[in-house]
Image (spheres, rainbow, N blue to C red):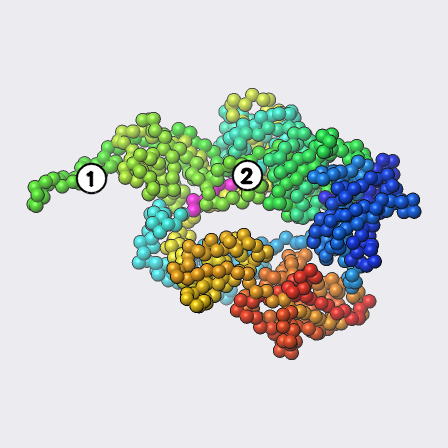
Amino acid sequence: MIYFCSRNNRRSLVQQSPTLNGIDYLEIVGGSPCGKQLALTFLKSARSLNLTPANITITGGAAVTVTSITPATAAAPFVILVNLNQTGDFSPYTLGLVAGTGIIDPPDGIDPQLSSVTFSFKAGCPTPADCVLNNCCPTPPQPAPDINYLARDYDGFRQVILDRMAALNPKWTETHAADLGIALVETLAYAADHLSYQQDAVSTDAYIGTARSRISMRRHARLVNYQIGEGSNARTWVQMSTAVDNLQIPAQTQFYVRVPGLAAVAKAGDPVAQQLAQSTNPIFASMQAATLFTEQNSMNFYTWGDANCCLPAGATQATLVGNLTTLKAGNVLIFEEVLGPDTGNAADANPANRWAVLLTDVRTTNYKSNPLVDPLTNQKITQITWSAADALAFPLCLSSMTDAEPPVMVVNVSVARGNTVPADHGVWINSEDLGLVPAPPPAPITTSTCTCGTTSSVTAPIPRFYPELAQSPLTFSIPFSGISSVSAFLAADPADAQPQITVTSNDGLTWTPAADLLSFSDADHRFVAEIENDGAAFLRFGDGQYGAAPDAGVDFSANYRVGNGSIGNIGQDALAHVVFPASFISPLTNITGIRNPLAASGGVDPEDMQHLLQYAPFSYEQQLRCVTEADYSQAASHVSGVRAARGTLRWTGSWYTAFVSVEAAPLTTQLIDSTTARLNPLRMIGTDLAVEGAVTVGLQITMQICVDPEHFQGDVYDALMQVFVTGNQCNGQSGLLNAANFSFGQMVYASPLIAAAQTVEGVLSATLITFARVDDPSIDGVAQGYLTMGRLEIPHCDNDPNHLNNGIFVLQMDGGK
């Protein structure tokens, strides 16, 4: 099942089909709710179905195996019995019908949408709550307050406080200096300015603290192995519409921000292109060549005849209308809501409901190499899959019913758009003359020594060639060599950005940029691009010892790119013009649309001097060895996958052993090995190392709830379970029993549990009946009001019936309706 739809019309449509059959429902039989036999009921007679165990797949929870199948009989023509080797656990299971081993398509005559069913072996277990799933859409997290944490002087602090006050209390607009509020703000800014001055004064004894040039500070920072951040340019996906197929778009095609009154498409040198080039808005360029197809301009989703459908959050597959043969794995599609679900009007579409995915698989044919179709309607379809890294972050509405009277069905609420081109911020400046390398200064005067009568050897100075680029800022871009996901493309690490510049000299040499010259010899033609505080870029060449030194009289020229930083983070649909190279031969009318459905991201400003001054002097103060127990804890916590760690030094008879307890979900052998590999180079000689899992202590919690007579008991039960769930609630807040809320040695108190229960609407009273450790129920936590944990113990209450040792949470409901 790809979609969750509130109206399931597929069942009645298949019943009307003369050739198709499908699963109606499934029951657990065999004498108890935990039986080893499944009764599979079909919509129509199943006596013609020749199913074998190879046609049945059962996934989920503990593995179960199909041993045999009892076919339908005249007495029960709609039911076949599936016999299993054992029953399952509390996990949800899915039974599917397939054409054979290794085939994902259903057998002939079975509808694809009714070829699988989800069930539970424990469906007969009693529960006070409604069994209907409550599919909730989590609200997006609230953004952090927009506060400039880089403010360092009186004016900056004063403005930050005023900005924050304007956000918290918009009605307060006083600006008079005699106002009490303004006086308090300026007093706080004055105090903050003094604190900032004292912080700066602490580092005045260090050379980096007295530097006033960003380039000087960069060199000081490099000596302590601090790599200054030069920022990175922004990148986005440009979606183009075409009127012809196989339209080739060359790399470095330029895209411009919308300028009213100008044509959308132009060629280099045209009057429109010249006007666009004079704009001060960011300019983007395609990062690779692309081929456009008409069928990818806009593609509709296929909902298999159902209504009120959506792609749920976390979806990694969908079905599109038609056999889209131009779609391939590696294409990027952008899902976009184009109609308001409640009104059907395009103006009411939510522009935030847009998402880009990188396709990992495209199916247009079935396992028989026939075109993929809906067997009910013979509608051609295409099934697409994308990676989990690009899983849908929100529910995407595909079809809906309007809120008018009578309601009207709205189809194609959202569409998929192809013909996407990756583009990043920056424009190339070609063949800029950097000038001639000047002659070296006069050599120093040498004299004979009074000891040996020989001539002193003094190294002759080299020419000072330190050219400045005419335009700025220099672009720092992350190399585009194929992407694994759209998320990785839009959220690349700025530390990987490289300067977009090459330098050539008239003696036939090509010079390439480097982060520094310390590891290069006099045979390496490299240079360093150094950025000043105002964005001016200077090129520093080698001195003949660290990197080759340029010869006097040689003329240099540079090809470089301009455009960097957060200014390139333009909003969605900001790009509206494309300028092709003069060599582009296709008619410009073949391009019918140009836009960026998603906002550009990844643009990061260069690290400023204040930030550098704060971070560089302390970058080398890293503990690269483990001596104390805290050192082992901190080092292990940096391993990917480790949630928390605690180190313990124990005398094991002849030497000390560092036992490192790690908490992870799940704790695997691979994680233990990687943690050991991380800590081994850091441990002291003579100290052994052992990595082990943390001690999990399950909590047994039983609460008696008195429900208000005006509330349904099941509704109150559901609300309580949402407060105490071990995962995240629908409103995005963490549940009280979430494992992330517990850590090593944490004492668990009873009062927060009772307080949380009493805040739920419909709860008259909450009484804690049981509050104890699963491994030691003799400790009465109810009486003492808390449970203590050992230093290496972590409390858990996962409430998983398959793992009761990790804690159980029980609600005893009384009263209500």
Which dot marks residue 483?
2
Direction from residue 355 to residue 439 in the image, left or right? left
Q: Is residue 328 above or below residue 43?
A: above
Name the residue nearer the viewer: 259 or 202.
Answer: 202
Left or right side of 685 for 367? right
Q: Eyeballing the image, is 740 above or below 386?
A: below
Residue neighbourhood size for the residue with mark 1, other residues' Cα within 10 Å, grouped as few (<14), some (14–19), many (≥20): few
Nearer the observer, 681 or 539 = 681
Is residue 727 placed above or below 539 in the rendered structure?
below
Observer able to see residue 612: yes
Residue pointed to by mark 1: 459
Could you say whether the residue bearing mark 2 is in a helix, strand or loop?
Answer: loop
Mark 1 vs mark 2: give the one in front: 2
Give left or right: position of 630 versus 121: left
> Which quadrant is the C terminus positioned in?
bottom right
Q: Earlier in the sequence, mark 1 or mark 2?
A: 1
Q: Quadrant of residue 707?
A: bottom right
Residue at x-position 71% and y-position 48%: 59
Give x and y (percent) for residue 762: 75, 68
Magenta span: chief secondary structure: loop
What's under tag 2, amino acid-wise?
Ile
Give coordinates of residue 740: x percent, y percent: 59, 61
> Alpha carbon of mark 1 to alpha carbon of mark 2: how far?
50 Å
Q: Is residue 688 above or below residue 409?
A: below
**What's the residue at 60%, 67% (across, down)?**
697
Residue 404 x/y as whole percent? 80, 46
Q: Is residue 634 in view?
A: no
The quarter of the rendered structure image containing the N terminus is: top right
Residue under the image location 51 percent in, 23 percent down:
582
Residue density around tag 2, few if under 14, some if 14–19, many if 20 or more, within 10 Å:
few
Q: Which residues are magenta?
A: 229-235
